[in-house]
Image (cartoon, grey):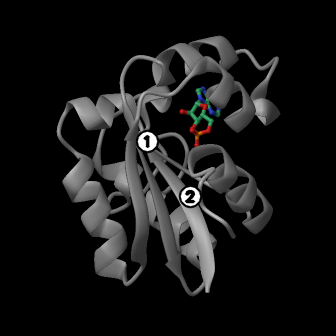
Amino acid sequence: MQKTLVLIKPQAVKTGLTGQIIRRYEEKGLNLIALKMVNPTRQQLEKHYEEHEGKIFYNSLLETMLSGPVVALMLEGKESVTVVRSLNGATDPIQAAPGSIRGDYGLEIEHNVVHGADSIESAKREISIWFPEYEA
Ligand code: CMP
């Protein structure tokens, strides 16, 4: 069964959206197989977002993600990477369809409530960053 990784971002955690967001994934039929609240380190975030290093939004992305705890989820199910990306919606909440998680909560791209792994390889890499104790 395919596994994927989601981070619920600090602003969403602060505003009490964690339960509603988790429910979306569970209602779709994905299994929540691990969950933790983490105060991320800069080093973890640099590793997680290494593909974005040097981009114009990179520094503010890191500061935003350092502004409070995130909730990391490991989800499992058929085609879970694709299913999570579809439930999340487009990166920019303005473009994200109503009914998608990003489409329903917020307006700002840097506070787009969730991050989801974008491929099976990314999911494996990101699971090792946020759940290092987990043996694939
Ligand atoms: P996420 O899925 O966490 O992956 C990278 C994040 O960078 C993205 O969601 C957005 O929150 C943030 N970001 C900020 N500005 C941009 C941008 N112009 N394009 C893409 N991502 C951006």
Checking the image for residue 93, the label placed there is 1
- Give how far across and how far down residue 49 sits, in percent: 70, 33
Name the secondary structure under disc 1: loop
> Could you tell me the amino acid type at mark 1?
Pro
In this rendering, which labeled residue sits more in front, label 1 or label 2? 2
Checking the image for residue 5, the label placed there is 2
- Residue that appears at 61% across and 87% down: 1
Name the secondary structure under disc 2: strand
Relative depth, front residue between 124 and 82: 124
Q: Quadrant of residue 46?
A: top right
Please state if 23 lies on the left or on the right of 118 as rendered.
left
Quadrant for the C terminus in the image: bottom right
Please state if 13 lies on the left or on the right of 111 as rendered.
left
**Quick check: 111 above or below 5?**
above
- Residue that appears at 43% across and 71% down: 33
**Quick check: 50 above or below 128?**
above
- Give how far across and how far down residue 92 sits, in percent: 51, 40
Checking the image for residue 115, the label placed there is none
Relative depth, front residue between 97 and 8: 8
